[in-house]
Each structure stands twice: as structure tokens, then as C-alpha cells.
């Protein structure tokens, strides 16, 4: 199934709040004004935004990325938004690209670090399709990703605003999928450092597969340092096997996956805008 903007006359407005109504009208008007230049001529339509999800056997993952695509469409109504999966779920990315034909597109991977999928699988699928498309960087590391991780931890019970004495026994394990690619590990370590600065406690990255340490291994490291109140931060876009397994290892609290947090929609559009602002000749 392809995530796309509904026709304007099929998208109901919530009339329960004047402020909500004005915001909704304002966002739609802004989207239409982007298509008109200062001299009144209609600008070319923007490239389609293709969200590239990994895919999962867990049905919650598909529901989550569809909802995320809907939120992006709501935030940028004039932007065509599509969804494609690398594996396991439909629609597959090659099928989504085939439906675009000659329509220019920017692919934003719903992945949180560099790795084989970002470096090889996605570019190869684009090259095979013949679609005039460019691939944005993964979503992490980035401050908006860290804000999402922070909010999910607070939702799970992390003591926001705790004093220094309380936090001396606290720490976080940042649970990620894992990859053999050293760039992926470097990105995850960077996200862990940013989150540690945000929380004021140690944050150790750990992995569900293909890399060390595991979540349990990271927990042992922290216990040896006197950190016995340890949360697991779920650095996964959507629910799935890896996020479930990592959460089960948590000795205290485990945060929910990133999901449809508002900061995630802004981060996706930021990556899209980054690519659109880069001249084509400057992209390798």
C-alpha cells in the first residue's frame, strides 16, 4: 500500500478548536503557496518524498511507518509522500519506484545509522529503477533523534529533573539493531554521546545483532561501574523482534520505539529539505 496525500476535499477538518482550525488552514495554504513564485508563475512540483522502511514480520511495524507517512503528509500537505520497504513488507521499494515513472524523488531512509542498506541496497535499487532519485542520509545521528529518545524515556518513567545525587546510580543502554559496518557503529556511538549529554548520565550503545556489546553485556559493564538503575532506550523506528528482545532484557524500564513522535516527522522533512537544497551536481 502506498502512503499518499488524500485529495483536499476528502481530508476532514477538526472543528473542535478555533486554533486547530486556523493551524490546519494555515498549513494547507502554506503548502499551496510553495508552488507559486513571487511573479505569480507556478513553480515545478517538489520531488516526491519516498520513506524507505526496512520491513518486519511484526505487523505493528507496518502500521507505525504508515502512520508516520501520514503525519509527514499532514505537516507538508503539498508534498507527495510514498512508502517503500527494503524487504518483508509491501510495497517493496522497487515497486514504489516503478510507480513513480519519471517523477523526481528524494528517498529518506527510516534507518538510524549508516550501514549496508543505506550505502548499497537502497542506491542499487534506485539505480536499477532508472528513476531520477537521490538518497538522503539516515535519520541518525541528529539532535531531533536524541529529543525523541529522551521523550520516550521520560514517558517510560525516567526521572526528568532528578538531582545529581539521584542520577549517580542511573544510566542508559542505547539498544540498536547492529551492523558489521564500522560507520554504523560510529553513528550509534555518536547518538549515545548526544543522549548522555542530554540526560547527564552514562549511555552505552548495545546491539541486537551483528555487533557487541549486547544489551546484557552493556548492563554488566554499567553494574561494574556502580550504575544499578539502568534504562534501555529503544533506538528503533518501529516495534519489531529486535526492539521486543532488547526491552525484555531491561532490569528497570524500557522506552518505546521512536514511532510517530513529532520530532521524527520534522527530522524526516529536514533530511528531505537537505537533499533538495543541494545542487544535483554536488551529489556524488
Image (tube, grey):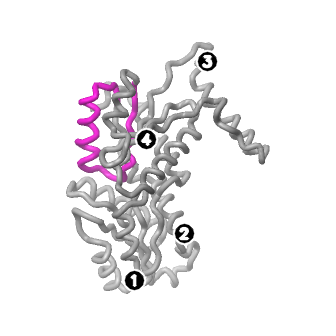
Dot 4: within a 10 Å radius of its alpha carbon, few (fewer than 14), some, or many (20 or more) residues? some
Q: Earlier in the sequence, mark 3 or mark 4?
A: 3
10 Å crowding of disc 3: few (<14), some (14-19), many (20+): few
Q: Position of residue 217 (x, y in %)?
A: 28, 77
How far is mark 2 from mark 3, CA to CA? Answer: 45 Å
Q: Residue at x 50, y 64 (%)?
A: 150
Q: Residues at badges 3 and 4 in contact (C-beta under 8 Å)?
A: no
User: Which labelled disc corresponds to residue 227?
Assistant: 1
Whether residue 155 is visible here, answered yes or no, is yes
Q: Is residue 33 above or below residue 260?
A: above
Helix, strand or loop at mark 1: loop
Mark 4 or mark 2, earlier in chain: 2
| Residue 203 makes an appearance in the image | no
Q: Is residue 204 above or below residue 118?
A: below
Residues rendered magenta in the picture: 104-133
> Which residue is under mark 2?
154
Picture disc at residue 38: 3
Q: CA distance from mark 1 to mark 4?
A: 36 Å
The secondary structure type at the circle numbered 2 is: helix
Relative depth, front residue between 97 and 72: 97
Which is more N-terminal, label 1 or label 3?
Answer: 3
Secondary structure type for disc 4: helix
Q: Residues within 10 Å of mark 1 (few under 14, many from 20)?
A: some
Q: Examine the structure image and report whether residue 16 is included in the region drawn in magenta.
A: no
Name the residue tied to disc 4. Answer: 271
Quadrant of residue 125 in the image?
top left
**Among numbered discs 1 and 2, the one appearing first in the sequence:** 2
Quote the CA–CA distance across marks 4 and 2: 26 Å
Amino acid at each position: 500500500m502506498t502512503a499518499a496525500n488524500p485529495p483536499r476535499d476528502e481530508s476532514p477538518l477538526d472543528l473542535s478548536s478555533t486554533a486547530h482550525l486556523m493551524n490546519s488552514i494555515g498549513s494547507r495554504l502554506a503548502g499551496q503557496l510553495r508552488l507559486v513564485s513571487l511573479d505569480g508563475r507556478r513553480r515545478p512540483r517538489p520531488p516526491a518524498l519516498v520513506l524507505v522502511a526496512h520491513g518486519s514480520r511484526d505487523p505493528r511495524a507496518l502500521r507505525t511507518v504508515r502512520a508516520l507517512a501520514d503525519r509527514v503528509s499532514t505537516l507538508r500537505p503539498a508534498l507527495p509522500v510514498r512508502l517503500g520497504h527494503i524487504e518483508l513488507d509491501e510495497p517493496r521499494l522497487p515497486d514504489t519506484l516503478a510507480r513513480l515513472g519519471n517523477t523526481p524523488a528524494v528517498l529518506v531512509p527510516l534507518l538510524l545509522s549508516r550501514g549496508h542498506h543505506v550505502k548499497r541496497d537502497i542506491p542499487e535499487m534506485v539505480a536499477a529503477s532508472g528513476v531520477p532519485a537521490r538518497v538522503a542520509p539516515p535519520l541518525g545521528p541528529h539532535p531531533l533523534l536524541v529529543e525523541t529518545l529522551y521523550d520516550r524515556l521520560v514517558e517510560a518513567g525516567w526521572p526528568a529533573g532528578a538531582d545529581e545525587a539521584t542520577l549517580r546510580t542511573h544510566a542508559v543502554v542505547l539498544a540498536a539493531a547492529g551492523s558489521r559496518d564500522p560507520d554504523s557503529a560510529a553513528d550509534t556511538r555518536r547518538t549515545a554521546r548526544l543522549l548522555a549529554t542530554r540526560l547527564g548520565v552514562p549511555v552505552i550503545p548495545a546491539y541486537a545483532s551483528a555487533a557487541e556489546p549486547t544489551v546484557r553485556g552493556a548492563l554488566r559493564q554499567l553494574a561494574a561501574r556502580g550504575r544499578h538503575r539502568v534504562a534501555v532506550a529503544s533506538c528503533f523506528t518501529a516495534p519489531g523482534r529486535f526492539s521486543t528482545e532488547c526491552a525484555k532484557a531491561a532490569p528497570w524500564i524500557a522506552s518505546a520505539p521512536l514511532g510517530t513522535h513529532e520530532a521524527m516527522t520534522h527530522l524526516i522533512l529536514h533530511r528531505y529539505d537537505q537533499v533538495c537544497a543541494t545542487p544535483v551536481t554536488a551529489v556524488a
